[in-house]
Amino acid sequence: MSIIPHEKEQNSRSVAMSYFDYQDALAFRQMALVHGVDLPKYLLAPEIAVILNFLPDLRQRLFFDTLWNTGARLNECLALTPVDFDLDNGDRPFVVLRTLKQRSRGKGRPRKDEAIRRIVPLLDAAYVQRLREYFATVRPLRSARVWGVASDETRRNWLKAALNRAERDGVTFTFTDITPRTFRHSFAMHLIQHQVPMKVVQAYMGHRELSSTEIYTKIFALDVGQQYGVSFSIPLDAVASLLGRKQC
């Protein structure tokens, strides 16, 4: 069974996301995948939900749920400890991500204006509740890594196993090279689909330059003509009335 017809049924029951037409979003993304070689590959929210469902282990599922809800890089997510989460900040829970991607700046101490941490609001109440329940059940040490000390390759294998289970159950996706980074791309596109301003998306993603964030807007450039109702065909009778029959 393909994920596409399955979600079409969901959409007909108004279960799928309401802020855009799911089938149209699938067709739009397929156009980007086929013709946009350098464009980031992303999943839609219903597809993420399906993948998470095939992660039976609570820790594994919450790990990828965190990638999806925060847009964290893999190494940023692996480094998280309980103290990085503030789940009791009223209705404004958030997580602090430590930026570990420092290869481009070279050696030495960070500059005063160089952000090495960023705050990402946790916008999904159900996800925040899952975090609370996980911490209450597992009770990790405040300074210990939430997901343990296994390698990033182990986390990639968790995802591969989930995708294999989905495939055995007849669930397939539009593209096959789904990785932890796919969740980061999906987070960014999810925000943009909700019309979150690009400067805000840039801050959440931890991009130093806005140009790094604008790669996602290139996807929407493929659809700009349809958004504005651009058409190049004009009925002949309209042409005649506009130009005059002698000119036609």
Image (spheres, helix red, strand yellow):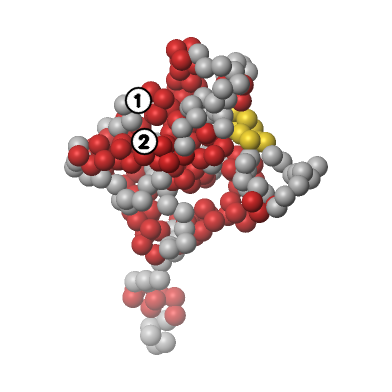
Number of marks: 2
Q: Nearer the viewer, residue 244 or 136?
A: 136
To which residue does mark 2 refer? Answer: 158
Mark closer to the chain start, 2 or 1: 1
Given contact means CB atoms under 8 Å apart, are the residues at marks 2 and 1 in contact?
A: yes
Would you identify the image quadrant in which residue 130 lies?
top left
Q: Residue 184, image x and y in percent?
A: 49, 43
Which amino acid type is shown beneath numbered disc 2? Trp
Between the C-alphas of marks 2 and 1, the distance is 9 Å
Q: Residue at x 33, y 52 (%)?
A: 175
Q: Along the horizontal axis of the image, is 121 left or right of 162?
A: right
Q: Label 2, secondary structure: give it.
A: helix
Q: Along the horizontal axis of the image, is 109 left or right of 62?
A: right
Q: Nearer the viewer, residue 174 or 236?
A: 174
To which residue does mark 1 refer? Answer: 57
> Which quadrant would the C terminus be assigned to in this image?
bottom left
Which amino acid type is shown beneath numbered disc 1? Asp
